[in-house]
Structures are given as structure tokens and as C-alpha cells.
Image (cartoon, rainbow, N blue to C red):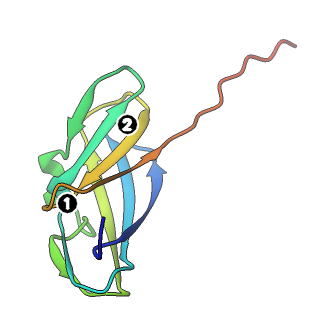
Amino acid sequence: MSDNLKKMTVRIHEDPEYARLYVKIKNIGHDPISVSSLKFLLLTKDGSSHRVATQTFLEKGSFPDMSLPPNRETGGSILFKTKSPPKRLIYEDYLGNSMGIDFLFVESELDF
């Protein structure tokens, strides 16, 4: 990713109709970077892919579209119209550089 390095962290929030994620991106490079919620793609456990839901833009505290200066962090909520659990969140910047986070879920059955 050359000089435009980013660090991403994600929290999942329960929602009955959406995959609701709180995403933070930090610019750890030396130059400003452009960030946008439109650059996220969610891959889900059922094998489908989803772009940001339009409902995201109506939410207070949604992920901003902005120029992020070096050593600064921004974050906000992003909604995806799916009920399937997230498997991987991918962010691709305007230069074509991408980064992703995999979600790990542990499934177990208990017999009593």
C-alpha cells in the first residue's frame, strides 16, 4: 500500500434486519487518504457479497466520507442488507489497494 497505509478495526452489533458493523480506519501513512463507506464489501457465511445498504446514510454516526490526515482515525456504523453472519469485510481504496478482516465464529453443540 505504499505510503498510504491504513489500520482497520471492526465491531459487530446485533440488528434484526442488517449486518451492522462499527468500523474504524486509522491513517498510519505520511499522506492524507480518502475514505468512504462506499468502498466496503461484506462477504457473508452463506457465500454472498454485499455493498453498503442505503440505510447507512440515514444513520446518525455512520461512517464518514472524508480526507483522513496522517495519524488520524475515523469511524462509524456501516449497514449491509443481510441476516447472514459476516465472514470477511474488505475495504478497497481509490487507488485499488485493499485490506480485509476475517470474522471467526465458533459453533458448538452442547448435550445435557
**Residue underneath mark 2:** 16
Of residues 45 and 111, the one nearer the viewer is 45
The amino acid type, in three-letter code, at marker 2 is: Pro
Quarter of the image with the N terminus is bottom left
Q: Within 10 Å of the Cα at label 1, are there few (<14), some (14-19), or many (20+) other Cα atoms?
A: some
| Alpha-carbon span between mark 2 and mark 1 | 30 Å
Percent position (x, y) of residue 30? 31, 86
State which quadrant residue 46 falls in. top left
Residue in the picture at 22% in, 35% down: 50
Which element type, helix, strand or loop, lies under badge 1? Answer: loop
Tell me which label, 2 or 1, sits earlier in the chain. Answer: 2
Residue in the picture at 39% in, 59% down: 22
Q: Examine the rendered structure and indicate whether residue 59 appears above or below residue 86.
A: below
Percent position (x, y) of residue 100? 38, 49
Q: Examine the rendered structure and indicate whether residue 85 appears above or below residue 53.
A: above
**Residue underneath mark 1:** 93
Q: Examine the rendered structure and indicate whether residue 62 appears above or below residue 85.
A: below
Percent position (x, y) of residue 109? 73, 16
State which quadrant residue 87 falls in. top left
